[in-house]
């Protein structure tokens, strides 16, 4: 099958060779998630500028009036319209002030929605991922500590101020006589003046520590002064106790660089407060969430929770009941909006999915989701719709892609869209439905003009792109359509999507070579991002619930794809089983492992992440699941960070008592890279699922998982005979 198009201008041989060497700038460069730096590399500020300004206007409502009722704004567009890129520009772009932007990579349908949201916020706060160049913990801790330290200094007595700068020897005695205190007073005044002004945005982390170093103030002294001030001014009710611990943890993170106190409290300590009436699990979660929101609102930091690629988030498993999942998700958002003020929800979804699910929801849910928001300067915002951009903006996108290639070519006299002509760029822009479709067509046209043919790949390595098909055929559609791109031939190994859709219930094909390359590339990318997220001191502790959910996703995927460990195979998986009033520790994953024709072993697998005082509490909670009546598990496996594996004191006693009761359990040491692997798996699955045409299932992943996760599989399975 072939056709002709308007001939492109003749290209000098040297220019063609340079372009070939530089590579196709339209390949492998699509936004895979809201943190993908590809978005920044090819960002065109004019693209969706109006929609971006409106969303930033909505966010500013929560900055200027922190107690604003929680609302939701849907951002709708076809697959490939540019939703993820728009979210990236809000989260990482230079426009607008800083906000805490939470972008969940998974949806835990069977978890209480408010609990799910709380631990998504905690994971984002403590994690190593950056937003607009800064870690969330940096921004929150530095600004809060600046304010608390300034208030504590101005409210402290002269003696308390002098104690910040202890004097050596005889000078200490002369101070009691009112002599020799001038230098200390000058330092206190200088420090007070510095703390009175907000830090510049580019001050970075450790600005508080630098201030202390400049005036030779010991960080522990500063923490003590703030601690006494907070203890004196905060009430002794539940909210006051929670705030006191959070203030202590944040100020210690900013002044001493120690994040462990905050991480331990947000995952353990908040459930151990000494209160007269023991609150329920839901009450604990709600209380902590409200206090955290009060902290952010007091700093005028908006909290934005943005759900991207909603169709894949909700329908990660194609055999799920989509309507039931969607109803649980949207009912959860409405519940959270009623219980927590000050949260701005952004939902990025395909228009078709939105129109399919929303009308089927209960009336009260629809009314709450469709509530319009008045944004000064932007009118009333009910929903944003991303349409195909006009040709002049598409040209700017093409220029942005080609600029580094043309600069590398070093040829003079080439146009900014070389090797394309104006007619070719405009024709594609006017005939394709989405920006992604346009970029796919430019990719194939570039291949034809520079390489002489459309590159033949059985599986396109662009996340978000369909397998390479006949140029002119829309991904996921059976009937070919005439496009403006040269068609050289049908790529070898091409399978018509309509035929694939009919036969997928019969067999799952193994990935071919190019598919495997794409899967491995995506795997490595997600794994690196997970490492960065979990590297900071308190990040691993803060991600405990997210890691537990990832473990459930991992084992469910192993079950779906027939992964085996020696003679063992999975017969059934319960991704998350909650069994305790403790929100962080009271959850495990249950896997039924069966060996040949034997009876299955019901294995409970939990994340044993507690540190310090939380370590025995975590262990006690996990071991208690073996005492359930009737029994829910036969064997318990606890995954523990390998830098703190030893059991001592109360933890050792609890373990020995469990052994005496005849309970089967074992500890498995996991390095940071092992937890990063686990953390990355749901995001990797989401990325590759999103890259497939609608209706096409995942290829069988058994071989890849068994190769890349061999050690993890052995740790979560019964011992191999």
Image (cartoon, grey):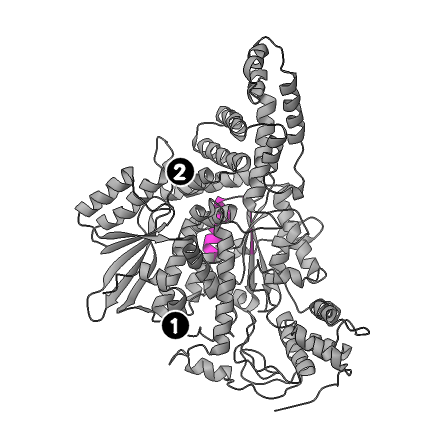
Picture coordinates of residue 331, whole percent (x, y): 46, 55
Q: Farthest residue in the front direction?
A: 169
Picture coordinates of residue 256, whole percent (x, y): 52, 35
Q: Secondary structure at mark 2?
A: helix
The residue wearing badge 1 is 703
**Closer-to-camera residue (317/531):** 531
**Magenta part of the protein: which range?**
330-346
**Residue at the image position 66 percent from the left and 43 percent from the top:** 201
The quarter of the image holding the N terminus is bottom right
- Residue 344 numbered tag: none
Asked if residue 285 lies left or right of residue 178, the reply is left
The answer to whether the residues at label 1 and label 2 have Cβ atoms under 8 Å apart is no
Asked if residue 20 lies left or right of residue 601, the reply is right
Q: In the rendered structure, does residue 588 fall within the stretch colored magenta?
A: no
The residue wearing badge 2 is 269
Q: CA distance from mark 1 to mark 2?
A: 42 Å
Q: Name the front one of labels 1 and 2.
A: 1
**Residue at the image position 19 percent from the left and 68 percent from the top:** 598
Asked if residue 659 lies left or right of residue 83, the reply is left
């Amino acid at each position: 099958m072939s056709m002709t198009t308007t001939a492109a201008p003749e290209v000098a041989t040297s220019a063609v060779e340079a372009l070939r060497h530089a590579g196709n700038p339209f390949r492998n460069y699509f936004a895979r998630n809201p943190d993908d730096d590809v978005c920044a590399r090819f960002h065109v500020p004019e693209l969706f500028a109006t929609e971006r300004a409106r969303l930033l206007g909505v966010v500013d409502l929560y900055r200027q009036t922190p107690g604003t009722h929680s609302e939701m704004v849907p951002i709708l567009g076809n697959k490939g319209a540019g939703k993820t890129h728009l979210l990236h520009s809000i989260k990482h772009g230079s426009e607008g002030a800083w906000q805490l932007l939470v972008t969940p990579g998974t949806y835990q349908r069977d978890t209480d929605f408010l609990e799910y949201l709380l631990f998504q916020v905690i994971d984002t706060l403590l994690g190593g991922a950056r937003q607009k160049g800064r870690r969330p913990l940096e921004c929150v801790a530095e600004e809060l500590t600046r304010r608390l330290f300034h208030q504590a200094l101005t409210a402290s007595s002269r003696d308390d101020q002098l104690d910040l700068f202890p004097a050596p020897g005889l000078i200490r005695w002369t101070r009691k006589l009112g002599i020799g205190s001038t230098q200390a007073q000058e330092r206190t005044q200088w420090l007070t003046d510095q703390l009175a002004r907000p830090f510049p945005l580019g001050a970075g982390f450790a600005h508080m520590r630098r201030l202390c170093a400049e005036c030779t103030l010991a960080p522990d002294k500063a923490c003590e002064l703030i601690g006494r001030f907070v203890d004196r001014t905060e009430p002794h009710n539940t909210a006051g106790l929670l705030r006191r611990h959070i203030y202590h943890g944040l100020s210690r993170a900013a002044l001493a660089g120690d994040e462990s106190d905050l991480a331990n409290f947000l995952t353990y300590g908040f459930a151990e407060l000494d209160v007269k009436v023991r609150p329920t699990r839901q009450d604990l979660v709600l209380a902590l969430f409200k206090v955290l929101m009060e902290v952010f609102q007091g700093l005028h930091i908006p909290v934005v929770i943005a759900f991207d690629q909603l169709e894949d988030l909700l329908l990660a498993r194609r055999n799920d009941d989509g309507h039931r999942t969607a109803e649980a998700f949207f009912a959860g958002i409405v519940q959270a909006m009623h219980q927590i003020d000050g949260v701005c929800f952004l939902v990025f979804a395909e228009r078709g999915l939105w129109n399919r699910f929303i009308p089927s929801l209960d009336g009260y849910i629809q009314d709450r989701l469709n509530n319009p928001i008045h944004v000064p300067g932007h009118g009333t915002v009910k929903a944003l719709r991303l349409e195909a951009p006009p040709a002049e903006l598409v040209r700017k996108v093409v220029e942005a892609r080609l600029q580094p290639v043309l600069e590398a070519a070093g040829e003079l006299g080439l146009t900014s869209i070389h090797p394309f002509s104006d007619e070719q760029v405009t024709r594609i822009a006017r005939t394709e439905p989405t920006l992604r479709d346009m970029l796919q067509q430019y990719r194939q046209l570039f291949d034809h003009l520079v390489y002489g043919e459309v590159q033949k790949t059985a599986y396109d390595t662009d996340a978000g792109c369909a397998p390479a098909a006949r140029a002119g055929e829309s991904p996921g559609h059976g009937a070919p359509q005439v496009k403006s791109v040269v068609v050289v031939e049908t790529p070898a190994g091409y399978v018509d999507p309509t035929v694939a859709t009919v036969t997928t219930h019969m067999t799952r094909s193994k990935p071919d070579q190019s598919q495997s390359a794409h899967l491995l590339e995506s795997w490595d990318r997600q794994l690196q991002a997970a490492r960065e997220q979990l590297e900071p001191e308190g990040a691993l502790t803060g991600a405990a619930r997210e890691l537990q959910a990832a473990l459930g996703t991992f084992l469910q995927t192993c079950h779906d794809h027939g992964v085996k460990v020696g003679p063992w195979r999975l017969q059934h998986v319960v991704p998350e089983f909650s069994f305790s009033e403790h929100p962080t520790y009271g959850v495990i994953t249950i896997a039924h492992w069966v060996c040949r024709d034997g009876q299955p072993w019901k294995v409970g697998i939990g994340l044993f992440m507690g540190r310090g005082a939380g370590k025995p509490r975590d262990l006690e909670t996990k071991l208690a699941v073996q005492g359930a009546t009737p029994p829910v598990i036969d064997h318990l496996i606890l995954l523990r960070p390998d830098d703190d594996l030893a059991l001592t004191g109360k933890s050792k006693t609890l373990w020995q008592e469990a052994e005496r009761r005849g309970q089967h359990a074992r500890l498995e040491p996991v390095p940071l890279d092992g937890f990063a692997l686990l953390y990355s798996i749901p995001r990797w699955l989401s990325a590759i699922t999103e890259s497939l045409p609608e209706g096409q299932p995942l290829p069988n992943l058994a071989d890849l998982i068994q190769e890349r996760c061999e050690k993890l599989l052995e740790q979560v399975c019964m011992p191999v005979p």
